[in-house]
Amino acid sequence: MTDLLRWQFDLTWSLATIHLDDLTDDDALWEPGPLIWTVRPDTGGVWRPDWAETEPSPIPVPTIGWLTWHIDWWWSGALATARGTAAPGPGDVPWAGSTAAAVARLRTLRSEWLAALETLGPDELAEPAGAWPSVAHLVAWVNAELMKNVAELGQLRLARRASLA
């Protein structure tokens, strides 16, 4: 199962790089409509995401910057869970402050995730992982969540570029 989960992750990451490699700060902070969630600096210069404990209705459209923060946050949490430590809350993970720094952060998380996957055999995959029934469930969720977020990010990038044409 590790080989299949790793293959799925590698496929998803290869799709992510199509969009991540070409992002600019203007792309990241582009607001596609009036109802959005984005990232913005607080009074101390730390970039914070828009956030609500209960998902609002209607759901705001995230900016690319918000999506890169969101991936950083949940992936940091998944790594913490895989390591048996406490996952960070949304307020514990600031946005990196620039698109280049955000993409670099995601690449670091990818490297850490791959290192964690290398340690997993059948016995480890079957173990519980925090709220997940097993580590395998956690790994499958990371693959699915990354694919969903990359699709959202890519669609926003394409819409922004089309709006400039």
Image: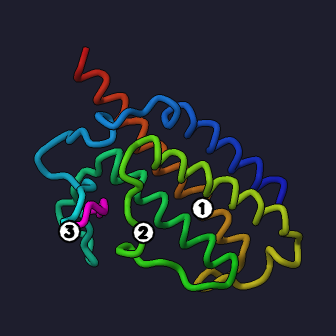
Q: Which residue is mark 3?
A: 56
First-in-chain label (2 vs 1):
2
Q: Which residues are magenta?
A: 44-49
Is residue 150 shown above or below 146? above
Q: Amino acid at mark 2?
A: Val
Closer to viewer: mark 2 or mark 3: 2
First-in-chain label (1 vs 3):
3
Q: Residue furthest left?
A: 34
Q: Quadrant of residue 28?
A: top left
* Residue 48 location (% of width, % of height): 29, 63
Q: Secondary structure at mark 3?
A: loop
Residue drawn where x is 49% and y is 60% of the image: 72
* Residue 7 location (% of width, % of height): 76, 47
* Residue 165 location (% of width, % of height): 25, 14
Residue drawn where x is 41% and y is 55% of the image: 96
Q: Which residue is mark 2?
A: 93
Q: Quadrant of residue 39?
A: bottom left
